[in-house]
Image (tube, helix red, strand yellow):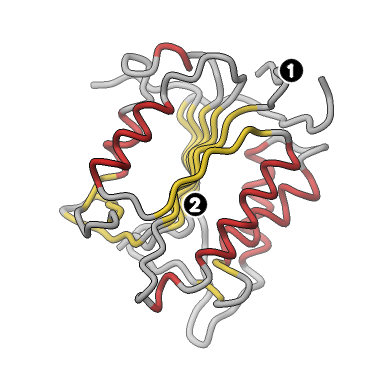
Amino acid sequence: YPMRSKYRGKLLLINNIFPDSVDRKGAEVDQTSISELFKQIGFKNETYTNLNKKELVNVIRDFNYNKKFDSTVIIIMSHGKMHEEETVLECDDRSLLPISDILSMFDNRNSPFLVNKPKMFFFQVCRGDRTYSDMLIGQSTVRGFKAHRDTYLGSWYISSMCDVFMNHAYEHDVETMLKMVDNKMSKFVSEISRQTSTYENRGFGKCYFHPGIY
């Protein structure tokens, strides 16, 4: 993919914090780490917190009309679970939004301005006939499992991703770095378990961020 625009791409970061929830402690740390990472890589950042379902859908639809960026990254951090055999995320108003509904907004029919451009999706959530292309979808954990976090360091997934991307974006493509993220996460151990991340490639080619090169 060509990555020569003034900004490497545009980042949409949505962070539903749920301040009273133990499972979302460290969410602010994740937000700061992600924002700094993509600023250093050369992205233009757009950040929102605590969106209800209607607000979240509207923000994503508006973001879908970016024409001048060579790539897009969508990161959503929230509560999540399995519901009727599908991964859903919980919005600030406690309503549920299937991840598949978000992805469908970026298929080739609904997102004509982003056809042939890399679209990367990362979901930091627990997980309890369209034509897609150029999409890479990262999940913090495999289906049916919890996503671990640390109050001070943030979530294992976001912390590992920020560290790997910050140190290797100049030399490796995104998919290779995601494999490195999973390897790094395997070294984290909670009191009862480890955590394994996962990603899905939907016609996604080699994508290098090339930070600092124009």
The foreground one among 213 and 29 is 29
- Whole-percent x and y of residue 195? 51, 68
The foreground one among 145 and 21 is 21
The quadrant in which residue 109 appears is: top left
| Circle count | 2
Relative vertical location of residue 171 with respect to residue 92 in this rendering, above or below: above
Quarter holding the N terminus is top right
Q: Which amino acid does label 1 sit on?
A: Arg
The quadrant in which residue 21 appears is: bottom left
Residue 112 left/right relative to 158: left
The foreground one among 193 and 13 is 13
Q: What residue type is labelled 2?
A: Thr
Of labels 1 and 2, earlier in sequence is 1
Callout 1: SS: loop
Judge depth for marks 1 and 2 and give the one in front. Answer: 1
Instruction: Measure how far apart labels 1 and 2 are at the Cα level.
Output: 29 Å
Q: Residue at x 30, y 63 (%)?
A: 128
- Whole-percent x and y of residue 139? 46, 51
Residue 128 left/right relative to 78: left
Callout 2: SS: strand
Location of mark 2 (residue): 198
Relative vertical location of residue 205 with respect to residue 67 in this rendering, above or below: below
- Whole-percent x and y of residue 113? 45, 12
Dot 1 surroundings within 10 Å: few (below 14), some, or many (20 or more)? some
Q: Which mark is residue 4?
A: 1
Q: Which residue is drawn at 36% across and 22% down?
A: 107
Q: Residue at x 56, y 56 (%)?
A: 31
Quarter holding the C terminus is top right
- Whole-percent x and y of residue 2? 69, 16
Relative vertical location of residue 105 with respect to residue 12 in this rendering, above or below: above
Residue 6 left/right relative to 50: right
